[in-house]
Amino acid sequence: MKKYFLNFFFLLPVFVFGQQNIELTKADQLIDSLVSNDLTHGQVLIMQGDSIVYQRSFGKSAIYSDTDKPNTNQTYFRIGSVTKSFIATMIFQLIEEDRLSLDTYLSKFFPRIPNSKKIQIVDMLSHQSGLKNYTQIKNFSNWAKENRSRRKLMKRLYDMKTGFEPKSRVAYSNTNYFLLGLIVEKLDRRSLQKSLEKRIFEPLALNHIFLGEDFEYITSSAHPYMYTDCWEDALPVDLDLIGGAGAIVSQPSDLATFIHALFSSDQLLNDKSRAEMMTFKNVLGRGCMTVPFYEYSAVGHNGDINGFLTNAYYFSDQDMTIVCCLNASRYPINNLIVGVLSDYYKKEFTIPNFRGVQLNDSDLQKCIGNYFSNKTFLELKVYHKNNELYGQIIGQSPFYLKAKNKLNFTNEGFGIKVEFITTKSGKITGLLLKQRGQELLFDRKKEEK
């Protein structure tokens, strides 16, 4: 796990790329506020019909990078479980071709899977099979690091007990779609990537999407991060062990094109198949889910895979598709989507206040000055702008300091805590800078004490 401290301390400028044919001023303000507070990195896109009318790329695709690497409209993201909509689409295509049916039993393809003689394709599509979620088995991440083999994974699935009888419950499970992906391979007699290309990518002219075994080698791919007390590299995942459950990588524009084509036309499925797919139990359909927004409803899917978050939904009332892909976020993706949709549908929405305690000018004036570390010979300038405090290591970018109180400030994105040191009379003589388990004392320059 990478750690960074002070002299490796590269801070985030605000990067925003995009195109707009509709004015979403409040959505822009929300995104600007999230980025300036280092709360999220990614892209939001809206399509009206088959045309992009709003696209905002923000933050960085690589947070700790020697060169600035912003998210752009050409950045690739892992879309996680939105992959399931692609797998379900191909399953229904096979049904239309009379090569499969919803009533087909899993035992036809994988007789060694527990309860396979009772589990039907429809049960797997709708998460009612009773197959436990293999990615949530204890220590799966550690196991996957040491067992990068589909054969070993299948043995694990053969040995796994079921959680309940088919059709008796609904329980979301990646196992269903991993196996459905393998069934597509068996029936098409080619790799899942080739089936995706022939059945979906090529018919829709999607050139910036693929099954992601070689994701890390694409220079325009985003890197995933998780946040504890600072941004840290998300745990790696072998996408070959994820397959049909969530291994697709895409630019948001290609994903939006797919979602729009799937739910608004017969380009991929006929009306009967689409109706079967959109048979919902609670919110879960067969490779899709439905979500409400005020008096409107949408159909699509969510994705969450080792630091990447994706929402992709279609609103039929406006023939509108919205896609949000994030590679690092400390702000709920649902709240971001709600904010953008609220502006689109002209609903009331209040942008949260992400700033800290508001201090008056005299309190901030006591903190400003130049501070010097005798240990590292680094000089730190503290100044205020627009009634907010900022720090800047000389030769590096400035960073915002959120006030906890008059003497304690933080920058959560970089795991920084600053405690100002005072005399008994309250005069500031220095500061203690804490970052990721390390501490560095800075003395206030004598001429400014």
Image (cartoon, grey):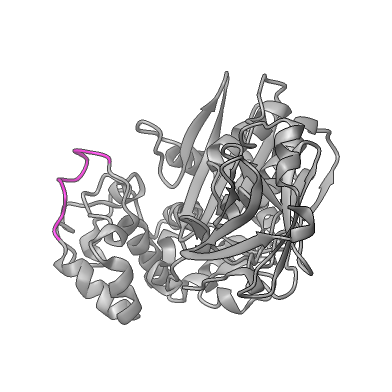
**Does the magenta stretch mainly form a helix, a strand or a loop?**
loop
Q: Do we see residue 160 in this rendering?
A: yes
Above or below: residue 373 compared with residue 422: below
Of residues 2 and 18, the one drawn nearer to the viewer in this rendering: 2
Q: Residue furthest front?
A: 425
Q: Which residues are magenta?
A: 161-170
Of residues 226 and 209, the one drawn nearer to the viewer in this rendering: 226
Query: Horizontal and vertical percent for residue 180?
Result: 36, 60
Which residue sits at x=23%, y=54%?
Answer: 132
The quarter holding residue 174 reads bottom left
Query: Horizontal and vertical percent for residue 447?
Result: 79, 58
Of residues 25 and 47, the one drawn nearer to the viewer in this rendering: 25
Q: Do we see residue 261 in this rendering?
A: no
Q: Is residue 168 magenta?
A: yes
Query: Horizontal and vertical percent for residue 65?
Result: 67, 72
The quarter holding residue 161 reads bottom left
Q: Is residue 239 magenta?
A: no
Which residue sits at x=54%, y=38%?
Answer: 334
Q: Residue furthest right?
A: 21
Question: Would residue 194 appear left or right of 49 to someone viewing this image?
Answer: left
Which residue sits at x=65%, y=61%?
Answer: 443
Above or below: residue 448 compared with residue 236: above
Which residue sits at x=40%, y=66%?
Answer: 242
Above or below: residue 277 compared with residue 97: above
How many labels, in total? 0
Query: Horizontal and vertical percent for residue 136?
Result: 28, 58
Question: Would residue 181 appear left or right of 200 to someone viewing this image?
Answer: left
The quarter holding residue 117 reads bottom left
